Image: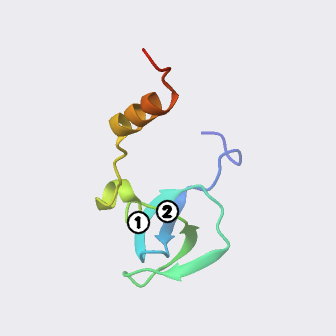
Amino acid sequence: MKKGIHPHYRPVVFKDFSCDFAVLSKSTIKATETIVWEDGNTYPLVRLEISSGSHPFFTGKQKLLDTAGRVEKFMRKYSKPGN
């Protein structure tokens, strides 16, 4: 690899503060905050708005839409009389 052209690849903590879920990974993202991790080391911190710890798909709280009922309601409302 050429020297000086690649971003710094380092360990970073990604934390979702809505559910207190955090993961230590490696990234090149720039971070202004730091956090002390479970191992006692200080790592850059990236705040997340949503993660697998709070996303409805992964938590099992996802709502399923009744599309068949919506189609029938539309057809009743906008169908011409006699069809």
Q: Position of residue 67 (x, y in %)?
A: 37, 37
Amino acid tagged 2: Ile
Judging depth in this view, the residue of 18 and 4 nearest the camera is 18
User: What residue does disc 1 label?
Assistant: 54
In this picture, residue 46 sits left or right of residue 60: right
Location of residue 82 (image quadrant):
top left
Cα distance between the residues tagged 1 and 2: 6 Å
Q: Are marks 1 and 2 in contact (CB under 8 Å)?
A: yes
| Residue count near mark 2 (Cα–Cα under 10 Å), binned few <14, some 14–19, many ≥20 | some
Quarter of the figure that contains the C terminus: top left
Q: Position of residue 44 (x, y in %)?
A: 57, 72
Judging depth in this view, the residue of 30 and 22 nearest the camera is 22
Location of residue 48 (image quadrant):
bottom right
Q: Residue at the left extreme?
A: 60
Q: Residue at the right extreme?
A: 4
Residue at the image position 53 percent from the left and 61 percent from the top: 10
Residue at the image position 48 percent from the left and 75 percent from the top: 18
Quarter of the figure that contains the N terminus: top right
Q: Position of residue 6 (x, y in %)?
A: 65, 46
The image's colouring method is: rainbow
In this picture, residue 25 sits left or right of residue 49: left
| Residue count near mark 1 (Cα–Cα under 10 Å), binned few <14, some 14–19, many ≥20 | some
Judging depth in this view, the residue of 81 and 12 nearest the camera is 81
Q: Position of residue 51 (x, y in %)?
A: 44, 61
Judging depth in this view, the residue of 70 and 10 nearest the camera is 70
Amino acid tagged 1: Ser
In this picture, residue 12 sits left or right of residue 82: right
Q: Which mark is residue 5?
A: none
Please, is residue 18 above or below residue 81 in the view?
Answer: below
User: What residue does disc 2 label?
Assistant: 50
